Amino acid sequence: MEWFIERTFSLPFSSTFRSNMTFNTSYHDDTTQSDLLYVSDYEVKSSLEIGYEGLTVQLSHVLVGPQMITNYDIYQDEKKGSFSSWDLTARYRFDTHWEVKGSILNLFDQEVEWVRGYPLPERNFWVGLTYHF
């Protein structure tokens, strides 16, 4: 889904909301007929982007639903709860070809694991400079 908010409300700046949702209603191993591990019941990715002249700011969110995983500490399958994460990115395009970009990943410094034993990195920062041909 994509909604160009500025068109709806006649805003003097660009503003777009995007969201993609996936719902896994049936997933199992064809051989064993057991549920697949590490497959979430649902996943929702959304972002709000606002831009004015050369500056664009984007707030992104991902929500990952519960899933069955193997807990290798006790070698048993168990249900892992849902979790979410937020990122913030700003871009500024100057001149005709240059763009500077900065991001704050894991904005709220959440302690979550995409896969057991592999935590999402702490809040971290990324800065880049791009030349577009």
Image: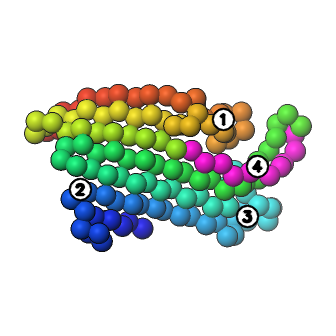
Amino acid type at circle 3 is His
Q: Which residue is mark 3?
A: 28
Residue for point 49% across, 28% down? 124
In 3D space, how far apart are the residues under numbered discs 3 and 4 (Cα atoms)?
17 Å
Label whose residue precedes the other's in the sequence (3 or 1): 3
Residue 37 in view here: no
**Badge 3 vs badge 2, beta-carbon distance below 8 Å:** no
- Choose mark 3 or mark 4, whichever is in front: 4
Q: Which residue is mark 2?
A: 13
Quadrant for residue 39, please give it.
bottom right
Amino acid type at circle 4 is Lys
**Badge 1 vs badge 2, beta-carbon distance below 8 Å:** no
For the record, the magenta segment spans 75-85
Label whose residue precedes the other's in the sequence (3 or 4): 3
**Badge 3 vs badge 4, beta-carbon distance below 8 Å:** no
In 3D space, how far apart are the residues under numbered discs 1 and 2 (Cα atoms)?
35 Å
Q: Which residue is mark 4?
A: 80
Q: How many marks?
A: 4
Tell me the quarter of the image containing the N terminus.
bottom left
Q: Which residue is mark 1?
A: 111
In 3D space, how far apart are the residues under numbered discs 2 and 4 (Cα atoms)?
41 Å
What SS does tag 3 mark?
Answer: loop
Q: Is residue 86 above or below residue 122?
A: below
Label whose residue precedes the other's in the sequence (2 or 4): 2
Residue for point 85% across, 34% down? 73
Q: Nearer the viewer, residue 75 or 125?
A: 125
Residue 81 appears at what percent x and percent y?
Answer: 74, 51
Give left or right: position of 114 versus 94.
Answer: right
Tell me the quarter of the image containing the C terminus.
top left
Amino acid type at circle 1 is Glu
